[in-house]
Image (cartoon, rainbow, N blue to C red):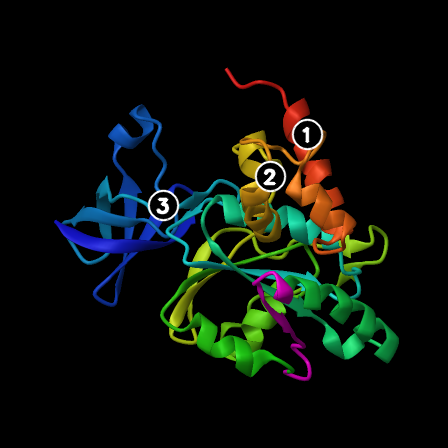
């Protein structure tokens, strides 16, 4: 038996890369019985009678996984957001950051279409980005057309398994094509009727880019906080997590509790009021979530 990594899943087949060769595999029935699904990114043990077809026998332990998109063993998430067309959305970015942080995946924030910004618009976007930098996030302003910022992102991909994620129509596929035009990943324009991007990626696949592996995915089909508990939400906001150590009461949710260091920091403008309001919005969603059985 041989070890390899699943780099593509399509129509019930898993394409395993091992020693430079691609083996088309099926999963053993025991996986279905135990309700285990092999994921792109999984390190696996497989058995093959020839160099084309085989069976996955074992899935090695995962360091993390995402459900939608279904992918495992991610080092970092490149969160791609548009500065315009569609407009930059801080609340959506914070939603992505919470999901990525809760999965213990390192996020890098990339804002695309910088070439379309006027000076005033660039100033407004930079206002948001500077705050994210101040709380410890790596932030890049990019343009696939002018290649602004592309060289800064190159070395961050080397030796890493990265997932590109973000809203539709923000230029994820265009950005990957900018790294390697030979890939020719399908892109599409924003739908003028719907006002949002059309999905152009239909399956999850790991692609060799800039010395690392990049997952081109259909995007996050769900941004619900189904796996996050109310008491854990604050840990996904770095500035709230840090300030929470000074709260009077242990387990403070930074909502209605007295002597809350986080609320005090918001009042003093040490923590962004907008980010804090997003935190409260997400907290309410989690509290109103239907219980799981």
3 or 1: mark nearer the eye: 1
Relative image position of residue 90 (x, y in whole percent): 73, 54
> Which residue position holds label 1?
257
* 108 in relation to 281, above or below: below
* Quadrant of the rendered image containing residue 35: top left
**Quadrant of residue 29 in the image?**
top left
Query: Start and end of the magenta stretch?
Result: 133-147
Q: Earlier in the sequence, mark 3 or mark 2?
A: 3
Which residue lies at the image location 25% right of the left edge and 29% below the top edge? Answer: 30
Which marked residue is nearer to the observer: mark 3 or mark 2? 2
Residue under numbered circle 3: 13
Q: Which residue is mark 2?
A: 247
Q: Nearer the viewer, residue 248 or 244?
A: 248
Residue 38 sits above or below residue 268 on the image: above
**Residue at x 80%, y 74% (from the top left corner):** 122
Q: Residue at x 82, y 54 (%)?
A: 195
Ranked by sequence position, the earlier of labels 3 and 1 is: 3
């Amino acid at each position: 038996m041989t070890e390899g990594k699943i780099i593509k899943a399509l129509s019930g087949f898993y394409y395993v890369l091992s020693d430079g060769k691609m083996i088309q595999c099926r999963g053993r029935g025991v996986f279905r019985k135990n309700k285990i699904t092999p994921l792109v990114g999984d390190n696996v043990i497989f058995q093959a009678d020839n160099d084309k077809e085989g069976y996955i026998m074992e899935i090695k332990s995962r360091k993390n996984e995402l459900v939608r998109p279904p992918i495992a063993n991610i080092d970092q998430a490149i969160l791609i957001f548009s500065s315009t067309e569609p407009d930059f959305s801080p609340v959506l970015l914070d939603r992505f950051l919470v999901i990525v942080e809760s999965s213990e995946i390192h996020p890098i924030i990339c804002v695309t279409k910088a070439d379309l910004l006027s000076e005033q618009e660039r100033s407004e976007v930079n206002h948001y980005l500077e705050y994210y930098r101040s709380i410890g996030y790596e932030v890049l302003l990019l343009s696939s057309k002018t290649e602004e910022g592309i060289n800064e992102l190159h070395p961050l991909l080397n030796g890493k398994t990265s997932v590109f994620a973000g809203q539709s129509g923000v230029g994820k596929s265009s950005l990957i094509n900018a790294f390697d035009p030979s890939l020719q990943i399908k892109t599409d324009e924003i739908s003028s009727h719907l006002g949002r991007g059309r999905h152009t990626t239909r399956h999850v696949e790991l692609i060799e880019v800039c010395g690392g592996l990049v997952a081109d995915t259909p995007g996050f089909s769900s941004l619900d906080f189904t796996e996050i508990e109310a008491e854990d939400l604050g840990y996904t906001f770095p500035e709230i997590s840090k300030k929470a150590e000074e709260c009077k009461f242990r387990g403070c949710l930074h909502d209605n509790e007295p002597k809350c260091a986080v609320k005090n920091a918001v009042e003093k403008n040490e923590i962004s009021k907008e980010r804090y309001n997003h935190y409260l919005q997400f907290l309410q969603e989690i509290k109103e979530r239907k219980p799981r059985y």
